[in-house]
Amino acid sequence: MLDPMKRRLIFLLTVGFWATAAMPVLWAEEQVDLLELMQALQVPTNLRQQAGQLTKSAKSWDRLSETDQAEVVRAMIELFKIRDNAAILLPASYYATKINEQLAADPTMLELPLPIVLKVLAVMDYDFYNGQNKEELAKQVLGEDVYEQNKKRRALLGYLS
């Protein structure tokens, strides 16, 4: 578990993560927490090592099988739950598929740490529950332009908000 000071620092940096280039470094530091969590979840050692690399960038994501991708996402969802007191309710397999689609559509996202990609996708689906208003969270995480594009996308899909 993280000490309270480090948890607060992570919270402050995570809230405005698009505004800072320090996030990849921050997630690299969090690699230890993810690996410890994956060990507790009894994830095989080789997959834990690959997941550790994904906290730095998503470049090696496509080397994982679909099953392993879902397992890594499941562990990252658990990490958000423990570290940020946030819930992501849609299944890990759903997000593994969404990550594959997003990385194929925008290869520049391969440079981002996978937990950031996961958080952005969950926020876009209004599936990141951390106590904040969904609209405000989306504006904060996505920025005004992407927020507006996402709002239009959700309207086309038939979502009210």
Image (spheres, rainbow, N blue to C red):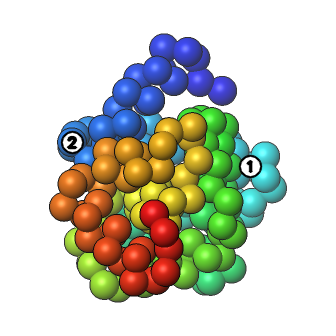
Image quadrant of residue 28? Answer: top left
Q: Amino acid at mark 2?
A: Ala
> Which type of secondary structure does the marked residue at label 2 adopt?
helix
Which one is earlier in the sequence, the residue at label 2 or at label 1? 2
Is the C terminus in the top left, top right, bottom left or bottom right quadrant?
A: bottom left
Residue 113 on image: x %, y %: 38, 56
Residue 144 on image: x %, y %: 21, 54
Q: Residue at x 59, y 24 (%)?
A: 2
Residue 68 on image: x %, y %: 65, 74
Q: Amino acid at mark 1?
A: Gln
Q: Which residue is mark 1?
A: 39
**Closer-to-camera residue (96/31):** 96
Seen in the image, is 153 located left or right of residue 41?
left
Seen in the image, is 123 located left or right of residue 57?
right
* The disc label shown at residue 136, or none: none
Q: Residue at x 51, y 59 (%)?
A: 126
Residue 137 on image: x %, y %: 41, 46
Seen in the image, is 62 located left or right of residue 128?
left
* The disc label shown at residue 19, or none: 2
Above or below, 85 against 128 in this view is above
Residue closest to the far front: 160
**Closer-to-camera residue (55/15):** 15
Q: Distance from label 2 to label 1 (Cα)?
A: 32 Å
Q: Is residue 144 something that shows in the picture?
A: yes
Q: Residue at x 61, y 83 (%)?
A: 65
**Closer-to-camera residue (141/43):** 141
Q: Residue at x 46, y 57 (%)?
A: 123
Is the N terminus in the top left, top right, bottom left or bottom right quadrant?
A: top right
Q: Is residue 53 something that shows in the picture?
A: no
> Which type of secondary structure does the marked residue at label 1 adopt?
helix
Count of marks placed on residues: 2
Above or below, 70 against 145 in this view is below
